[in-house]
Amino acid sequence: MTTSNAATSDTDPAVLGELTRLRDSIDNIDAAVVHMLAERFKCTQQVGRLKAEHRLPPADPGREARQIARLRALAEDAKLDPAFAEKFLTFIIAEVIRHHESIADDTAGGRS
């Protein structure tokens, strides 16, 4: 990984080394987050197909509210801003519902 353009030739090499180490950790965490989200969406796609097959609504507001409350508590325990965690989960839920609606539309189209 290259160092930032903001680093100058007179920056302490130990500082640059620590910066690189931390950024490498961030890159690894980002990769893990992407892979975890991919796994999560594989599961939610299965949920969407099950809901569509049984004509259940794409959204489940009660579960969504419970999940948001649960994630806020987890965030607090982890010293993460609960409002950020809620925004993040709300974004994911909206995408999941969009997928479920699409699956339901595709399934309904095949039911004539």
Image: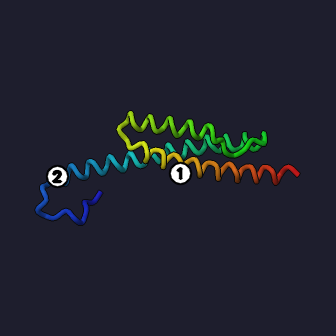
* For residue 91, above or below residue 5: above
Q: In the picture provided, is 82 more to the left or to the right than 14?
A: right
Residue beneath disc 2: 15
- Residue 18 visible to the viewer: yes
* Quarter of image, res 2: bottom left
State the residue at coordinates (25%, 52%): 20
Q: Earlier in the sequence, mark 2 or mark 1?
A: 2
- Residue 46 visible to the viewer: no
Q: Real-space Cα distance between discs 2 and 1?
A: 36 Å
Q: Nearer the viewer, residue 16 or 107?
A: 107
**In this rendering, which labeled residue sits more in front, label 2 or label 1?**
1
* For residue 109, above or below residue 78: below
State the residue at coordinates (75%, 41%): 56
Specify the quadrant that holds the N terminus.
bottom left
x and y percentages locating residue 15 in the rendered image: 17, 52
Give the residue type that dot 1 points to. Phe
Give the residue type that dot 2 points to. Val
Q: Residue furthest right?
A: 112
Residue beneath disc 1: 91
Which colour scheme appears in the figure?
rainbow
